[in-house]
Image (tube, rainbow, N blue to C red):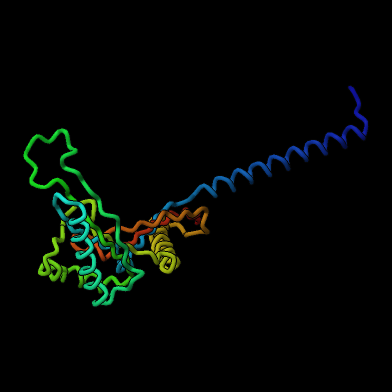
Amino acid sequence: MQKFSSSAIVCAVILAVGIFLLGVEVNSGLGSISANQRTVTVRGLCEKEVKANKVTWPIVSKAVGNDLPTIYSGIENTNNAILAFLKNNGIKDDEISINAPQVVDMQADRYNSNPIPFRYNVTNVVVVTSQQVDLVRKLIERQTELLKQGIAIVAGDYQYQTTYEYTDLNTIKPGMIADATKNAREAANKFAEDSQSKLGKIKTASQGQFSIEDRDQYTPYIKRVRVVSTIVYFLKD
């Protein structure tokens, strides 16, 4: 029978103990990984309605004729009347801009073979850009006063729509994110209770993009702000 030296026996024992301990560690590590895979993904929604704080109102008028100097003289009178209407009702100089007139020469249209009563068709646009949203809305309702002065105000042109914006998003962002996170945690807690588990720490969290849109087509000056947060929680027994 082959005899082993005491040193060889000691090395074998140490090797066996090392292999055993390594197996314990591997088993423990796998158990931890497996436990950490128990997660729940929830989404928290927060919506808020706010009033627009900026309005852009294009006031569009038309002029036609055969003599450009005469047309431009009429446009100058029209602009003076529009400016007087705006300033007398609280609109400031720095909230008003006048675009260059857009002239269309109807005789230059080679595809039009019909008789043309007027050679020139001129579009004139005065733009109000203001944070006085309520005031501008009232003036829009009163723009018929310009019609009574013989100013042909054009409405319904898709190129010149009144637009409303909300520009103070950073002010309400923190509160909305907090509400979205709270709603997500409530949903996660409910899931944990239903699965007879407890909610653990957050594994990952992502904040969705904020969206701002009209509440409806009839009240474009009321905006709906929306954000969705996605959060992954660990579950534990």
Residue 114 at x, y percent in the picture: 7, 37
Q: Measuring from the top left, give residue 8's x and y in whole percent.
A: 89, 32
Out of 73 and 123, give the one closest to the viewer: 73
Asked if one can make out residue 215 in the rendered structure from this viewpoint, the answer is no
> Looking at the rendering, which quadrant does residue 100 occupy?
bottom left
Looking at the picture, how far across and down is residue 87, in whole percent? 27, 74
Q: What residue do we see at 72% from left, 40% from top?
A: 22
Q: Is residue 141 above or below residue 43?
A: below
Task: Indicate the quadrant where residue 25 lies.
Answer: top right
Out of 39 and 179, give the one closest to the viewer.
Answer: 179
Left-right relation of 102 to 112 = right
Image quadrant assignment for residue 223: bottom left
**What residue is at 40 percent from the left and 64 percent from the top?**
169
Q: How many marks?
A: 0
Q: Nearer the viewer, residue 229 or 136?
A: 136
- Image quarter (top left, top right, bottom left or bottom right) of the N terminus: top right
Q: Position of residue 97 (x, y in %)?
A: 32, 63
Q: Is residue 85 left or right of residue 202?
A: left
Viewer can see residue 211:
yes
